[in-house]
Image (cartoon, rainbow, N blue to C red):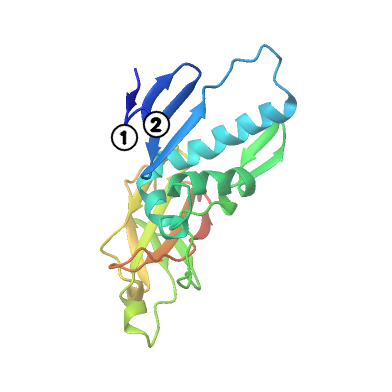
Amino acid sequence: MATFKDGANGSFNGKVGSVVGYQWRGINVMRSLPKKSKKPRSEKQLANERRMKLAMSFLSPITTVIRLGYQQATEGLPMTPFNMALSYHKKQAIGGSYPELYFDYSKAKISIGPLASAESLAAEWTGDGLSFSWDGSSDNLLMKEQNTIIVLHLEATKGWDIRTSGIQRGAGHYLFPLPSNLIGKEIHAYVAFNEILSDRMSDSRYIHVPAVG
């Protein structure tokens, strides 16, 4: 059932016949309902579906981080932060040719923005976890006080571990504690910075930590 707003000539929410009306970001939207096709899907369509699935498998577990990381980039645009990230990763972070497509972790970005990205980023294993370091020196106090975001994708478990607060950029290092069964395993890591009192972000930087031992 559809509900009208502002009378019969106004907007509506819900389905009426072959169209559906709804509000998105305060805008009244109406679109046609999709029609099922009996035609077999083309290779191009199948490749697009595979790209979508690969991008979603990376983004969905870290939705909260992605919304923060792409928030400023979508200001004034008719798209959500997550949709912008999805579009980027479908186009830029998928390698290979269909049907041999794969997700390229080195091309992924958990954030985009105008702040300076991490310089001299490095990571090494210790007995307690993964020790990150970056250039934290700066004459700019506001820059040194920027927040550091670290996201780990754990290849062994296909799981994630995230730190979004409590690490100042000016510290220049952070020991990311991990359980003993994950120490020395392969990890894909992303480091980004954001200003505490604004949506301003840096482009994230990627670092691959190979398995050891």
The residue that appears at 47% across and 32% down in the rendered structure is 30
User: Could you give the CA–CA distance between mark 1 and mark 2, rounded to whole angstroms?
Assistant: 7 Å
Badge 2 amino acid: Asn
> Can you see residue 53?
yes
Q: Which residue is mark 1?
A: 6
Residue nearer the viewer, 73 or 108: 73
Query: Mark number for residue 172?
Result: none
Q: Circles 1 and 2: CB distance less than 8 Å?
A: yes
- Give residue 25's quadrant in the image: top left
Quarter of the image where the N terminus is located: top left
Image position, residue 116 (x, y; %): 47, 73
Relative vertical location of residue 77 with respect to residue 61 in this rendering, above or below: below
Instruction: Identify the residue at the far bottom of this view.
Output: 139
Number of labels in the image equals 2
Image position, residue 173 (x, y; %): 36, 69
- Give residue 3's quadrant in the image: top left
What secondary structure is marked by label 2? Answer: loop
Label 2 Cα neighbours within 10 Å, binned few <14 / some 14-19 / many ≥20? few
Instruction: Identify the residue at the far left of this view.
Output: 166
Residue nearer the viewer, 171 or 113: 113
The residue that appears at 60% across and 47% down in the rendered structure is 93
Label 1 Cα neighbours within 10 Å, binned few <14 / some 14-19 / many ≥20? few
**40 sits to left or right of 105:** right
> Can you see residue 127?
no
Image position, residue 7 (x, y; %): 32, 30
Q: Which residue is mark 2?
A: 9
What secondary structure is marked by label 1? Answer: loop
Image position, residue 198 (x, y; %): 32, 66
Badge 1 amino acid: Asp
Residue nearer the viewer, 35 or 19: 19
